[in-house]
Amino acid sequence: MSEPVTALRGASDATGIATVTELGPLGMITLRGDLGDKAIIKAAVAAGGVTMPEVRHCATEGESGIAWMSPDELLIMSPYSEVHARLADLPDKLTKSHALAVNVSDARAVFQVTGPNAREVMAKLAPVDMHPDHFTPGMFRRTRIAQVAAAFWMPDAETVQIICFRSVAKYVFDVLNMAAQDRSEVGYF
Amino acid sequence: MLNIHCPNCGITAEETEFHAHGEAHLKRFGPGSSDDQFESYLFMRKNPKGVHFERWRHQNGCGKWFHVARCTMTLEVFASYSAQTYAPPQEVLDIIENKRPGWNAQEDAT
């Protein structure tokens, strides 16, 4: 097997009001189907290794997890080395359901923004109410970051984890760093 | 800026997370229709000053389609509702009637 390489080779910048780091590689499987179908939920739970999250939430445990993407889509996360094994298990469990499961690990980039100002960095870029009362750890939000589509959640109160397309990884890294540049605190949250 | 609610995933966000896709509830005229019908299906759109029904897509979110009733003059958004409808549901019409009494009659007159 060739060595997996992330889009920015784990670039990191801690010079601003929050630390922006490229994570990964992270295993990601897109699972589409009727989320009212118990077989699909069961397969997702088995592959994700966590309980099924509520609507607009995600459940994560280390690198494993399930995120609610849309009314008919889930994102199953896993350590990169396990993604093939987890994907291979899915078709057998989904034979009676109309569903689709695809490994999208290499099509994505993952970023982390950490620090007391992480909420502020996100609020500058996404049309999301980042107030601690409204966006809480455990919620999952698909939205845009500046001009590109992205999704993010907060593993804890001062960390935001972002998923975007690999093709725009450099743009997202740069725009996150611009929003996090030194002495740019707004002090809103 | 419009604040729009997506009935598919339940998120309310401003319009840059969504994309407008024109007038809602068009009836398609395809093969077998007259030239006039096809032309009006393809090109003729309402351009009201006031209540308008539109198709929107949650482009940067869940990716699903839905309908929005809004006012083109004040940019007030009345309601959003399922894409799987041929006409605005009664509760949406009631909301509009409440805020713009007689709006329908005005539209018919023009």
Image: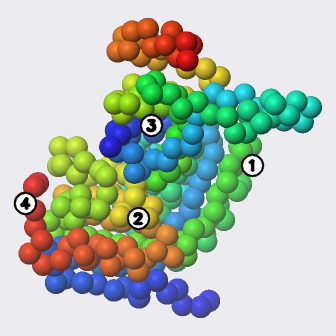
Which chain does the residue under circle 2 lie in?
Answer: A
Residue corresponding to mark 2: A147
Could you confirm whether marks 3 and 4 are on the same chain? no
Kind of residue sitting beneath label 1: Thr
Residue depicted at x 55% and y 12%: B109
Residue A95: which disc?
1
Please, what secondary structure does the residue beneath circle 3 have? loop
Q: Residue furthest bottom?
A: A2
Kind of residue sitting beneath label 2: Gln
Which chain does the residue under circle 4 lie in?
Answer: A
Q: How is the image coloured?
A: rainbow
Q: Is residue A58 left or right of residue B83?
A: left
Q: Is residue A153 above or below residue A51?
A: below
Q: Nearer the viewer, residue A97 or B76?
A: B76
Of the two numbered discs 2 and 3 in the rendering, the one whose residue sits closer to the viewer: 2
Of the two numbered discs 1 and 4 in the rendering, the one whose residue sits closer to the viewer: 4
Residue A187: which disc?
4
Pointer 2 and pointer 3: residues touching (CB < 8 Å)?
no
Kind of residue sitting beneath label 3: Cys
Residue corresponding to mark 3: B6
